[in-house]
Amino acid sequence: MRRPTLEAVAARAGVSRATVSRVVNGSATVNPEIRAAVLRAVDELGYIPNPAARSLVTRRTGSIGLVVSEPPARVFSDDPFFSLVVRTVSQELEAADKQVVLMMPSSPAGQSRVERYVAGRHVDGVILLSQHGSDPLPAALLRTGVPVVSHGRPVSTARPPYCDVDNVGGARAAVEHLLAGGRRRIAAITGPLDMSAGLDRLAGYREVLSGNGRRSLAAIGDFTRESGADAMRQLLEDDPGLDAVFAASDLMASGALHALRRAGRRVPDDVAVVGFDDIAGARFTDPPLTTVRQPIAEVARAIVRMLLTGADGGADPEIFPTELIVRDSA
């Protein structure tokens, strides 16, 4: 059976082909009675608009690019952050009758390919996720004229509108909790220092310690469980007498718990541990992890709203509060 054509719909509705085109492309200039007749004919014939032809008329593709500047192996690892953001963004766009296009450029060639794809107007907007300071892609995408928003505060000079959480305040709450519990030699496992989350959580940690006349001791991680274990071993070598550690992600805190157990240190008796994120697994570590909860899904929903409502480069960022969740590790 041949696919119904625009001409067939026009004949059934008793109108011109141009009128049918205006109706199916959402024009508001068509008489309501004529619109109803066209839509009735569309339904009766089972007409499905040609997306390519429709995009030529409307200059809209119905697609939004989600650009994740991480290798696929990282995105599809055991880190629940990425899966939750991708799932939430997809659900929000589906509810808005939009399609998500997931792009994960992990090389200069991949970045150039994404830039060409966006510049070719194959998507109506772009959401940036997990940006690193040296990444040239945000600036390149902003030059295309396609709307761009960022999940997280951009580190680079290219500053699209963004939503984020209060990373500094969350880190401060974690370290203040450790001090209030009598801990005196508090170390930190940071995230990558070319990312705003890593920089801001380290800043919050240092602010509290400097305000209390205490020195900071930090080791750099990359938000993975393995890097948390490696950083914890390094911190124990640097200061065997440390009695607390703030890890800038729950996965790194989980790795730290493993390294402390292997070193014969009891948690929280010898060393207290606080994480950041409050992932589902934080309740099931041994002991259950005290952590800073960030509203990951809420931020993802907000960034989709920001993009769809047309926020421009001067839009104020939307910052969500964090919450300290006290369990048994500190």
Image: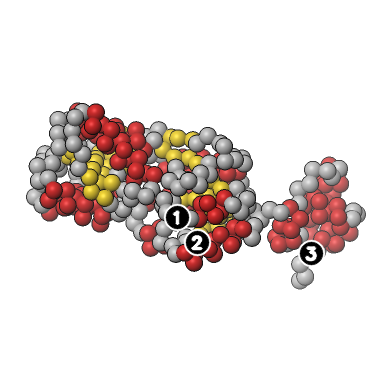
**Residue 323 in the figure: left or right of residue 141:** left
> What numbered label is drawn on residue 326?
none
- Report how far apart the C-alphas of labels 3 and 2 lie in the structure: 40 Å
Q: Quadrant of the N terminus?
A: bottom right
Q: Are marks 3 and 2 in contact (CB under 8 Å)?
A: no
At numbered mark 3, what does the secondary structure look like: helix, strand or loop?
loop
What residue is disc 2 on?
111
One can see residue 96 in this view: yes
In the picture, the quarter occupied by the C terminus is top left
Q: Is residue 216 above or below residue 37?
A: above
Query: Label 3, label 1: how many angstroms apart (C-alpha)?
Result: 47 Å
Measured Cα–Cα span from mark 2 to mark 1: 9 Å
Identified at 30% across, 41% down, the residue is 202
Q: In this view, does 20 lie to the left or right of 259?
A: right
Please say if the residues under marks 2 and 1 sit with CB atoms less than 8 Å apart. yes
Q: Residue shown at 19%/29% (left/top)?
A: 213
Residue topped by disc 1: 135
Can residue 41 be seen in this snapshot?
A: no
Image quarter of residue 324: top left
Under mark 3, the amino acid is Pro
- For the residue labelled by badge 1, is the local secondary structure a helix, a strand or a loop? loop
Disc 3, disc 1: CB below 8 Å?
Answer: no
Disc 3 target residue: 4
Whole-percent x and y of residue 328? 20, 38
**Closer to the camera: disc 3 or disc 2?**
2
From the viewer's perspective, is residue 120 above or below residue 23?
below
Q: Which residue lies furthest to the bottom in this view?
A: 1
